[in-house]
Image (cartoon, rainbow, N blue to C red):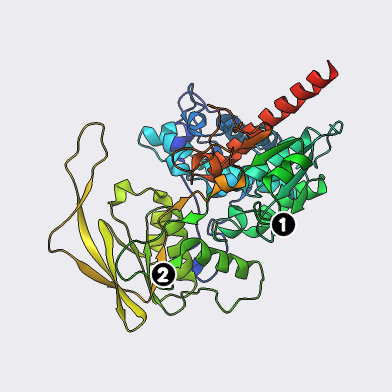
Amino acid sequence: MQQKGPSEPQGFVVQPRRLPKADATARVRDFGEIIVKPTAEALETQAGRCTDCGVPFCQNACPLQNNIPDWLNLTAEDDLREAWRVASATSTMPEICGRICPQDRLCEGSCTLNQSGWEAVTIGSVEAFIGDTAFDNGWVEPIHPAHERGESVGIVGAGPAGLAAADRLREQGYAVTVYDRHDRPGGLLIYGIPGFKLEKRIVQRRIDRLVDGGVVFVTGCEVGRDVTLAELRERHDAVLLAFGVYQARALQVPGAGPGDTVAALDFLIHQNRRDLGDAAGADWHTAEGREVVVVGGGDTAMDCVRTAVRQGAKSVTCLYRRDRENMPGSAREVANAEEEGVVFEWLAAPKALMSKGEAVTAVRAARMALSEPEFGKRREIVPVPGADFDVKADMVIEALGFEPEAFAAHDPDLALTDWGTLKVAGRSSATSLPGVFAAGDAVRGASLVVWAVKDGQDAAAEIDRYLRARTQEVAA
């Protein structure tokens, strides 16, 4: 890369941040990804904005501790193959995390340019481009272990944590079998995240690589129904529980009975199945022509409102009990939703569902206010007297988050936390059952995909150490 003279301004001053998106009026017509693929030249320019900080705050803010400045500089120098080698050293899914991570809350939010008043480097789009280029050019090497270990690991859950662990364990030579309740591997990546954020082919090529490398997927298999945890422990030398948390929190207001609301995950799964080419079932939900209200403020709520717009909803409103600054979802996703016509009612909490006959006609909401700030405490929300209002709705989607399912039913000796998640030993992945480990949302509760990837990779490393130590004990 040509060096700048001492009198020349730095590139980040001359070149603004550019993250090309499809126009909102065009992108709402389908479920394709909204970020326009950049040219190599544009990508090099954006990557070249990196200031190569002495303290890389972007890397520190990344759960995977990705070597972001290194692969940004390599991209700026048009050495994409080496950039891929560096990116894939710390992450099993760079091209996926580059698309769906909330970079505004992680690496880009901590970028020195962002902190100093300039817009952040487009880290996510560069990461996704590096991964796509690697697949397109055959740089993604197939899994060929140096030798077979002769031991097997069973993984429960084919979501991001399970896939990440399967990748690392198979590379070490273990026989890996992944069990999942759905009819396809991928978990949340396939069924929970809409195509406009992550097209299914991106996930499928990762799954194909695992299959080609010898990982076995057993789909349509639910632990506790089709196979017991005890049977898995007998079948495998180690077991990893990575089945996430999918028990939806229900809306607790008058008028909300069975059939009056739609669970967010059901709504998203139905659309993702359409995108995958499945024949629509008679009970599949659609927002076409309807007045939709989504209750919640996380990324799942944003996925729902943006999906409803694409399905042809008459109107889409999001109710969130706090203000914009306290919304748990990505600010980037909120901005995308607003561009696409979603109306946000901030500081609004559902109070009741209004009906005419058996049909819901509106959501009655209480206008809320934030309490005075107190040091070290989150501001409370309190209703504003006499400020209730109605929002028209003939479809209400609950996006209030997720809780753990009945994990204890798998084994009475499987220890749980007070929140119902799997209990592990400190920073370890080991559960209370010997040879059984846990990773991802099953331990953390509902969290980010990037944390699930990290947990899966860390659990794989711990399982490897456990099995190697056990082998040495037997040999001794």
Which quadrant of the rendered structure holds the N terminus? top right
At x 50% / y 57%, what residue is drawn? 21
Query: Left or right of 450: which side holds 200?
Result: right
Q: Indicate the amino acid at tag 1.
A: Thr
Which quadrant of the rendered structure holds the C terminus? top right
Query: Left or right of 33: which side holds 419?
Result: left
Residue 189 versus residue 91 in the image, above or below: below
Q: Which residue is mark 2?
A: 261
Q: Indicate the amino acid at tag 2.
A: Thr
Tell me the number on the disc at residue 89: none
Query: Left or right of 208: which side holds 293?
Result: left
Residue 167 versus residue 22 in the image, above or below: above
Task: Residue at the far bottom: name it.
Answer: 357
Q: Earlier in the sequence, mark 1 or mark 2?
A: 1
Query: Left or right of 130: which side holds 334?
Result: left
Image coordinates for residue 369, horizontal then vertical, percent: 19, 52
- Which element type, helix, strand or loop, lies under badge 1? loop
Q: Which residue is mark 1?
A: 219
- Look at the numbered discs 1 and 2 and tell me whether their residues touch, using CB distance below 8 Å: no
Task: Residue at the far top: name it.
Answer: 476
Image coordinates for residue 474, horizontal then vertical, percent: 82, 21
